[in-house]
């Protein structure tokens, strides 16, 4: 086997381990994602998994990064190229709802579950989760401020409160889908976001159809 092929195969194996790790962590929790649990799911030896990450914490951090890549692809990238301000804010919200509605991960929103697990547990994993959430919220805040400056939202809109309420709708949606298996929840979330943003619910649905299919 050539060195180049060996490196490529190692990268592929690592990617497969991470994909499995994200799915498992979304459904069973990030803390429960051990080297042994993942090795069993992958039909690999513990040493085979350990060789790619070195420790449970490094595995968790790598899984958080992999989950962030999925979120970027499935949500953030869907709004890329959309005009800043209200159009982008609508696209971001539409993509976020669609991400949960399509059950991209079996356990729903990876970061909602991970944040609940690690919110009061200091360390590198908590910092990584908090940092990624901060980046996303900052973009929502920026688009809210841009929309207010353009006159598409009231000039006195409290952007921090606005983002807080958007996040609350998404948390409620994730809970309704995961805990109650409520198939009506995505529609309720779109209506809630439409009332909050002051834009017809049809706009969120149309954005989902045109940009997110």
Image (cartoon, rainbow, N blue to C red):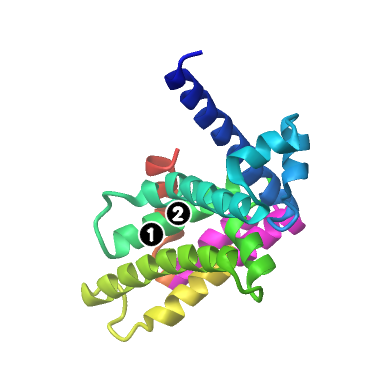
Asked if the magenta segment contains residue 195, the reply would be: yes
* Image x and y of residue 73, in percent: 43, 44
Query: Which residue is under mark 1?
Result: 90
Query: Which residue is under mark 2?
Result: 94
Callout 1 touching callout 2 (CB < 8 Å):
yes
Crowd tier of the residue under label 1, counting other residues whose Cα lies within 10 Å: few below 14, some 14–19, many 20 or above: many
The label number, if any, that marks residue 148 in the structure image = none
Quarter assignment of residue 211 = top left
Answer with left or right where residue 82 lies relative to residue 194: left
What quarter of the picture does the C terminus occupy?
top left
Looking at the image, residue 39 lies above or below residue 197: above
* Image x and y of residue 175, in percent: 69, 62
Q: Residue furthest top?
A: 1
Element at label 1: helix
Q: Which residues are magenta?
A: 171-196
Crowd tier of the residue under label 2, counting other residues whose Cα lies within 10 Å: few below 14, some 14–19, many 20 or above: many
Looking at the image, residue 51 lies above or below residue 176: above
Answer with left or right where residue 150 lies relative to residue 62: left
Q: Main secondary structure of the magenta part?
A: helix
Is there any visible trace of residue 100 in the rendered image? no
Q: Residue furthest left?
A: 150
Looking at the image, residue 123 lies above or below residue 77: below
Question: Nearest the camera: 52 or 18?
Answer: 52
Asked if the magenta segment contains residue 211, the reply would be: no
Element at label 2: helix
């Amino acid at each position: 086997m050539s060195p180049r092929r060996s490196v490529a195969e190692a990268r592929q194996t690592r990617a497969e381990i991470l994909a499995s790790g994200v799915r498992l962590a979304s459904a069973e929790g990030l803390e429960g994602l051990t080297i042994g649990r993942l090795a069993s799911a992958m039909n690999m030896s513990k040493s085979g998994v350990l060789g790619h990450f070195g420790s449970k914490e490094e595995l968790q951090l790598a899984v958080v990064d992999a989950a962030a890549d999925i979120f970027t692809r499935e949500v953030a990238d869907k709004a890329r190229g959309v005009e800043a301000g209200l159009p982008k804010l609508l696209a971001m919200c539409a993509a976020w709802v669609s991400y949960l509605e399509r059950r991209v991960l079996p356990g729903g929103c990876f970061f909602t579950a991970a944040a609940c697990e690690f919110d009061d547990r200091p360390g590198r994993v908590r910092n990584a989760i908090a940092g990624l959430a901060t980046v996303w919220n900052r973009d929502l805040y920026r688009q809210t401020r841009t929309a207010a400056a353009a006159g598409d939202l009231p000039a006195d809109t409290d952007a921090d409160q606005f983002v807080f309420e958007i996040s609350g709708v998404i948390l409620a949606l994730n809970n309704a889908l995961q805990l109650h298996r409520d198939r009506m929840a995505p529609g309720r979330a779109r209506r809630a976001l439409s009332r909050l943003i002051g834009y017809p619910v049809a706009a969120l649905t149309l954005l989902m159809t045109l940009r997110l299919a």
